Image (tube, grey):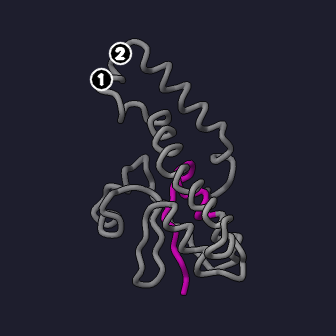
Amino acid sequence: MKIQLYYYPGNANLAPHLLLQEAGCDFELVLVDRDRREQKSANYLRLNPNGVIPTLVCGELVLFESAAICLYIADQYPSARLIPPLGSSERAHLYKWLFFLSNTVQPAYMAYRYPEKYAANLTQSDGAQPYQRGCRRGASRGGGASHAGL
């Protein structure tokens, strides 16, 4: 069964995309154009009512949240050995870091990358535009934009 990963370059879809590649499975990337706000379209919201990217579709299964998608991929392709064995201390540490990245690092990065969503009237203040331009330039230097399809 072909998997579809709904993505947008530079979003939280990098890890699921890499795991799909490492697993060697058949998958299709489906671009969700954030510039056109497709993640808020009725069609996309039927898949992911939160209107966020990424979303993974595999048959009747629809998953969102990068950590959940990553764990699902790893569980579906055990021969790829993407994660440590179940019950091991290494697996416990994987959970720790996965949840730390999802619950601590990613929200901080989102506030950095999209400050207008997190501060009232930020775009109206005199210093907001240089700050936002700097955030966007810094985010684009992170390497994600240079990888086709990621």
Question: Mark 1: which secondary structure?
Answer: loop
Q: Residue furthest bottom?
A: 1
Instruction: Please tell me which residue lies in front, 95 or 130.
Output: 95
11, above or below 123, in the image: below
Q: Quadrant of the N terminus?
A: bottom right
As shown in the figure, which amino acid type bears the numbered disc 2? Answer: Ser
Task: Say whether marks 2 and 1 touch (CB < 8 Å).
Answer: yes
Residue 30 position, x and y percent, is 50, 66
146, above or below 136, in the image: below
Q: Which residue is disc 2 drawn over?
A: 125
Q: Which residue is disc 1 drawn over?
A: 121
Residue 33 position by quadrant: bottom left
Q: Which residues are magenta?
A: 1-17
Question: Which residue is drawn at the image coordinates 66% and 40% (left, top)?
Answer: 142
Residue 147 position, x and y percent, is 68, 52
Residue 73 position, x and y percent, is 58, 74
As shown in the figure, which amino acid type bears the numbered disc 1? Answer: Asn
Question: Which residue is drawn at the image coordinates 36% and 23% (left, top)?
Answer: 123
